[in-house]
């Protein structure tokens, strides 16, 4: 959005310098992208008069001019064909920089004649491409005056960036209103002159597409003369980068920028049938004023006469009905187009125009009558003519709405300490009307030009059932079984909150965004916080450990066929899939070991005889969230890998147990608290399996060789060994304050014991009894031999254990060692009935 400082001051009474205006624009959210001061480059140039121009004595195409600069006479050698006695032009004295050529003038001689300056062309001043001759000024131009000031080129051009929600800021008056609200002057009153029409319009409206254009006005002005625009209008448009075309087109461009009110003018004598129709496109093609053909579709809104399409509504006019020097009767279009349809059409066709830029951001829906009258008055003033009555199609939409704001939210949400009276004053200066005031809040009427505040189709204050378009409640439809009163309450609340935030933003913006106290972001700790939850961290550690132990990770489906699932656990009907992705994937798995076994069987069938697989995933007991367990499962099949240190052997229960104990140790489970019982689930071999417990009730996992019948059914080798670890059952290790490690200064002592026990006694029971004989001195007890043979009575076996004794306070004597050995034997005998083997 571009405008000049002088243009801004037609709406804003202020004496603020350009620097302060730019600073204020930035502070209120209208970011200044640039300020162009054309007068700076033209400052050295003055108006001068040629007193006498005679041919150069030594050059046919040069003239020697005696020039009055207002401060004396100088001699200038000039090659321009239009240099002549009595003309007025623009003079540059020695030392001046010429922007069009990039040189700095010096006093010199040209073909023997002194030249102390230069008469300038438009291109040499950087004001255009014309260099056929020097610039000719009117005879009454004041000699000696600064050319930039006389020509009105000392008016800086300001360019601002406008956010998509601020359609009102695409008007010079809208920018002036914001600056006045920020305290940088006073907004000048504006009203359009009342136009009394003389007879009906020659061209009338008909609207067959009200969804795209709810309201359109127009009138004919007869007897106009369409020539060049006055200098002031051409200067304004040229300054902001618009090319002056003719008076009628320039007037519409002026109001597009001045009031943000796009207009279009048709040559009324070129409109066929005396009517213009707003309708859908039907595949027609017409030539636009931008010089390209446009093909319209059914979703596009077009303006057509009885012959063909004449305009693409809100975007670009048609060449066939454009105004030119022969135009005598003109029809002015002033419409309210749907911004979404304008945006979609413009995007599809790739047409960018000032009108589209404003329509798709939303224009003032109440400005149509005043905008039409203002444009009519300027056309009559510049071009003459007689205006007709207004032709109307549609009606003004119900745009009126309200919004409420709580004062405490200015600080709570916006972080600014603004007094309620100042907040209300800011809203008033922005055009909001105070509808109600309480001790802690204010309710305001939203002005018509602020279509970004409390966006609504209707007056929410009078029709609560019509909710705010663009809010959450306008996008999401409620569930059909929700209570209607509850839905209404939610819609009202969401709408009110959205409108309140809009008002808070306005108050903070005008008060100055730079006045909000900065708040530092929370400091970043030197040691980053954990990014994984306990459960996720455990899974990562288990995954790395099992991979390091030579197993490959699998990610399998959590469902399989019902028959296979039944081999690994219960298959309740609640875990049957209602809509399985395949007929053989219809049951949720009871354990990941089930799908691992199927995957291993497929590998074995394809020649990979020794797979070692693991998976961390869910197992399902029932359909509730609590019935889903996180399980680390693994399966080893075939033989151990070949190695030069030891021959390959068939995998067995002890490989699976070693995997389980390694995982539990990695997760910080105290090994001395574990016990193994022979009650593994039915998919394990009943005599080659175990359950790992922590205490009598907490089951941490299962391990063992798979049941022979299961292996036969799945075509797995009979020695396949697997495990399941219940990750959710593992308690988080207690966090203890770290201290110096205990390093006893005395050598540990090892004593071996061989006990004869009944075959039904577990080695775990014997080891537990040995450890408990003296917990202060016994550091470890481990099984290292098992013997069962003809040298022992039937039903008995020999278990040999190694007990590590660690003195801590003094070296043990032989008598103390013997006494401790006796305690170990007694404790084992009491707990298991074992006797020391002789």
Image (cartoon, rainbow, N blue to C red):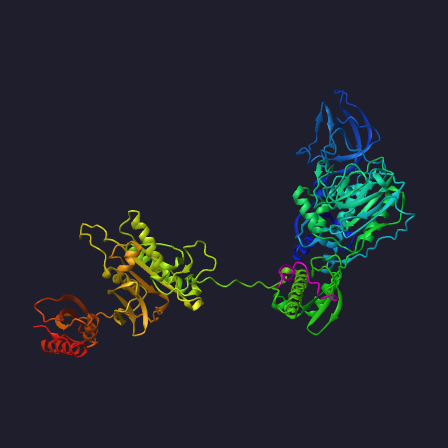
Q: Is residue 655 visible?
A: yes
- Residue farthest to the right? 198
- Measured along the vertical axis of the image, is residue 554 above or below residue 681? above
| Residue 826 or residue 834, whichever sits in front | 834
Left-right relation of 502 to 784: right
Q: Is residue 304 magenta?
A: no
The residue shown at (24%, 61%) is 653
- Principal SS element in the magenta part? loop
| Residue 250 or residue 63, whichever sits in front | 250
**Residue range highlighted in magenta:** 461-478
* Quadrant in the picture for residue 354: top right
Pick the quarter of the image with the C terminus. Answer: bottom left
Left-right relation of 323 to 782: right
| Residue 760 % position (x, y) | 19, 72
| Residue 341 % position (x, y) | 70, 49
- Measured along the vertical axis of the image, is residue 501 above or below residue 191? below
Left-right relation of 468 to 628: right
- Measured along the vertical axis of the image, is residue 260 above or below residue 460? above
Q: Total marks drawn? A: 0
Q: Is residue 156 visible?
A: no
Q: Is residue 467 magenta?
A: yes
| Residue 18 % position (x, y) | 71, 51
| Residue 622 or residue 267, whichever sits in front | 622
| Residue 101 % position (x, y) | 67, 32
| Residue 818 or residue 520, whichever sits in front | 818
The residue shown at (28%, 47%) is 607
């Amino acid at each position: 959005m571009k405008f000049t400082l002088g243009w801004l001051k037609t709406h804003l009474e202020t004496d603020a310098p350009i620097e302060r205006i730019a600073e204020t624009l930035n502070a209120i959210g209208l970011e200044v992208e640039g300020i162009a001061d054309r007068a700076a480059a033209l400052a050295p140039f003055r108006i001068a008069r040629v007193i006498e121009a005679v041919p150069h004595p030594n050059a046919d195409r040069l003239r020697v001019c005696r020039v009055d600069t207002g401060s004396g006479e100088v001699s200038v050698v000039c090659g321009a064909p239009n240099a002549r006695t009595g003309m007025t032009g623009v003079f540059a004295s020695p030392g001046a920089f010429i922007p069009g050529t990039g040189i700095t003038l010096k006093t010199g001689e040209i073909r023997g004649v002194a030249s102390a300056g230069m008469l300038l062309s438009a291109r040499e001043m950087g004001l255009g491409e014309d260099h056929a001759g020097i610039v000719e000024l009117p005879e009454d131009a004041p000699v000696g005056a600064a050319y930039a000031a006389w020509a009105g080129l000392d008016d800086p051009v300001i360019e601002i960036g406008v956010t998509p929600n601020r359609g009102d800021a695409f008007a010079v008056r809208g920018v002036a209103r914001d600056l006045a609200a920020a305290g940088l002057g006073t907004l000048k009153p504006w009203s359009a002159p009342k136009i009394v029409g003389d007879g009906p319009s020659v061209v009338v409206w008909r609207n067959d597409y009200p969804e795209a254009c709810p309201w359109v006005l127009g009138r004919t002005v007869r007897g106009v003369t369409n020539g060049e625009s006055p200098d002031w209008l051409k200067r304004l448009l040229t300054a902001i980068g618009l090319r002056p075309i003719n008076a009628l087109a320039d007037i519409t461009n002026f109001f597009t920028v001045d009031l943000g009110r796009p207009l279009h003018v048709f040559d009324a004598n070129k409109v066929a049938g005396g009517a213009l129709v707003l309708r859908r496109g039907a595949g027609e093609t017409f030539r636009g004023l931008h010089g390209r053909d446009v093909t319209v579709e059914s979703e596009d809104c077009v303006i057509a006469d009885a012959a063909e399409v004449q305009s693409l509504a809100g975007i670009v006019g048609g060449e066939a009905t454009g105004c030119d020097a022969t135009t005598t009767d003109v029809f002015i279009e002033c419409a309210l187009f749907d911004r979404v349809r304008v945006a979609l059409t413009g995007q599809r066709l790739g047409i960018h125009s000032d009108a589209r830029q404003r329509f798709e951001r939303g224009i003032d829906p109440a400005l149509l009558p005043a905008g039409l009258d203002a444009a009519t008055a300027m056309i009559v003033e510049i071009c003459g003519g007689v205006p007709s009555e207004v032709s109307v199609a549609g009606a003004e939409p119900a745009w009126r709405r309200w919004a409420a704001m709580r004062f405490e939210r200015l600080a709570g949400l916006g972080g600014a300490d603004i007094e309620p009276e100042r907040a209300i004053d800011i809203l008033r200066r922005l055009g909001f009307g105070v509808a109600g005031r309480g001790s802690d809040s204010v309710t305001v009427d939203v002005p018509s030009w602020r279509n970004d505040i409390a966006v609504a189709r209707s007056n929410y204050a009078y029709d609560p059932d019509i909710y705010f378009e663009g809010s959450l409640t306008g996008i999401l439809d409620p569930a059909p079984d929700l209570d209607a009163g509850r839905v209404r309450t939610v819609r009202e609340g969401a709408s009110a909150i959205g409108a309140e935030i809009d008002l808070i933003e306005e108050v903070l913006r005008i008060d100055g965004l730079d006045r909000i106290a900065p708040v530092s972001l929370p400091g970043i700790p030197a040691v980053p916080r954990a990014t994984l939850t306990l459960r996720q961290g455990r899974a990562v550690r288990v995954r790395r450990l099992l991979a390091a132990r030579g197993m490959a990770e699998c990610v399998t489906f959590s469902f399989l066929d019902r028959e296979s699932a039944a081999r690994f656990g219960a298959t309740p009907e609640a875990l049957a899939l209602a809509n399985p992705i395949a007929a053989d994937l219809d049951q949720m798995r009871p354990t990941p070991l089930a799908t691992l076994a199927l995957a291993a069987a497929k590998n074995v069938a394809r020649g990979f005889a020794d797979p070692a697989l693991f998976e961390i995933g869910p197992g399902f007991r029932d359909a509730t969230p609590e019935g889903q367990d996180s399980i680390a499962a693994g399966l080893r099949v075939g033989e151990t890998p070949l190695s030069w240190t030891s021959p390959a052997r068939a995998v067995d229960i002890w490989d699976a147990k070693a995997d389980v104990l390694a995982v539990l140790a990695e997760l910080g489970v105290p090994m001395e608290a574990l016990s193994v019982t022979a009650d593994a689930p039915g998919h394990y071999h009943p005599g080659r399996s175990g359950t790992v417990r922590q205490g009598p009730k907490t089951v941490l996992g299962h391990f063992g060789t798979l049941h022979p019948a299961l292996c036969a059914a799945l075509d797995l080798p009979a020695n396949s060994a697997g495990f399941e670890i219940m990750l959710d059952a593992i308690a988080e290790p207690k966090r203890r304050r770290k201290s110096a490690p205990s390093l006893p200064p005395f050598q540990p002592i090892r004593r071996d014991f061989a006990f004869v026990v009944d075959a039904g006694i577990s080695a775990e029971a014997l080891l537990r009894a040995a450890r408990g004989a003296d917990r202060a001195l016994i550091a470890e007890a481990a099984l290292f031999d098992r013997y069962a043979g003809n040298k022992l009575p039937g039903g008995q076996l020999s278990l040999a254990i190694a007990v590590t004794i660690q003195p801590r306070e003094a070296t043990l004597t032989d008598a103390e060692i013997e006494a401790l050995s006796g305690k170990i034997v007694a404790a084992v005998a009491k707990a298991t009935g074992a006797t020391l083997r002789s």
